[in-house]
Amino acid sequence: MNAIPQAATLTPDDQAPVRSSRWTVAQVEALYQLPLMDLIFRAQQVHRENFDANEIQRSTLLSVKTGGCSEDCGYCSQAARYHTETEREALLPLDEVIAAAQAAKDKGASRFCMGAAWRGPKDKDLAKVSEMIRAVKGLGLQTCVTLGMLKDGQADELKEAGLDYYNHNLDTDASFYGQVITTHKHADRIDTLGQVREAGIKVCSGGIIGMGESRRNRAALIVQLANLNPPPESVPINNLVPIPGTPLADVAPIDSFEFVRTIAAARITMPESFVRLSAGRQAMAEELQALCFLAGANSIFYGDKLLTTGNPEADRDEALFEKLGLRPI
Ligand code: SAM
Ligand code: DTB
Ligand code: SF4
């Protein structure tokens, strides 16, 4: 079995100790190759060293600006260039956002995440999103937005508005990225994550599994996330939701155990991060979801819609949590 790096290093800036184990693709591939029972056991051990294994965090999503996006992400229903069922809509009015956030809070969500189908926000849009953040924060919810790539100064404006998390996924391995997206680069995503960190906002970054990538690509994505210094506080692992009309509409679904292995690899390499079992849950049996929780997932998207596609209804999730003895935090 490969040795797992455990070194705690000092950051050059403030000399504060930061856990920054450097992982290699070979090490993460070796994790993937473990017998499933050994891999899950190891992930569960890491999980229990860092979290209460019966607690789960819940974030509710709202698409505040849907469709019409300039980018060509091959999985996305919101790219203007693909003929999907998603129609272009204007930015939602503030009162609608507040009502949705209040409803999410009443249902028990702890974080409210607002998504916009932009390459990146224009300054006038950012001012409106900042108002939304202030209002949602005022309801006592943690705030998260996902708005695409940020320009200089925009992350500071979001921080000023009270933003807790910025979601910006690496999505896939740098070497596979160009097969899925050509209108921006993996390096652009890393750059935005740097701006978010620098502004003092927590990072939410993960990826999509099941886009036709190899196991090596999956291991490399996990390494690219885990080696961010520090790693993202929140790591969404999405299973591709195939969208008719997009280039990835007909990709063969990934084997469920390979998805579970990916969750376990994320848990082991990012021990202190919340790993979110994200898109794709609607197509998963309860038993598979439970296996993902056992492999170290401790967060979900909660509420009957993701951005444009469905998610299990809140009441069904409540019932599942009850059966599994999971406590929401
Ligand atoms: N436009 C912004 C961006 O790209 O960062 C924010 C919204 S974008 C829809 C947020 C994330 O949703 C993507 O990075 C991707 O990981 C995920 N996503 C989008 N469509 C998906 C799909 N069909 N299946 C799984 N995940 C998806
Ligand atoms: C993330 O990693 N997954 C969420 C959130 N961050 C923004 C989005 C999933 C979108 C699934 C497809 C859709 O509903 O359009
Ligand atoms: Fe646009 Fe984001 Fe969809 Fe890419 S993932 S097409 S950037 S909304």
Image (cartoon, helix red, strand yellow):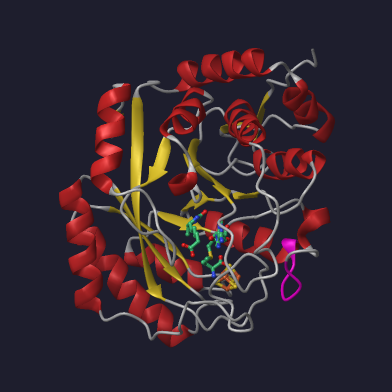
Measured along the vertical axis of the image, is residue 197 above or below residue 7? below
Is the residue 127 above or below the residue 256 in the image?
below
Q: Nearer the viewer, residue 126 or 265?
A: 265
Q: Position of residue 133 (x, y in %)?
A: 31, 66
Look at 68% across and 63% down and name the residue there: 248
Question: Looking at the figure, which quarter contains the C terminus?
Answer: top left
Residue drawn at point x = 24 percent, y = 62 percent: 136
Is residue 203 visible in the rendered image? The answer is yes
Front one among 298 and 160 = 298
Count every numbered label the image shows and give the total: 0
Indicate the position of residue 283 as horizontal and vertical percent values: 48, 46
Quadrant in which the N terminus is drawn? top right
Task: Give the side of residue 155 with respect to residue 226, left or right.
Answer: left
Magenta highlight on residue 173: no
Residue 164 vs residue 197: left or right?
left
The picture places residue 84, in percent across and down from the top left corner, at 55, 77
Residue numbers of the magenta segment: 181-186
The question of residue 183 being in magenta is answered with: yes
> Taking 23 as reference, is 240 above or below it?
below
Locate ligand 3 by image quadrant: bottom right
Instruction: From this view, report whether residue 90 is shown above or below residue 273.
Output: below
Q: In this rendering, would 238 be left or right of 98? A: right
Residue 204: where, in percent of width, then height?
Answer: 51, 50
Q: Main secondary structure of the magenta part?
A: loop
Picture quadrant of residue 243: bottom right
Is residue 109 visible from the viewing direction of this image?
no
Occupied quadrant, residue 181? bottom right
Q: Quadrant of the rendered structure where residue 327 is?
A: top left
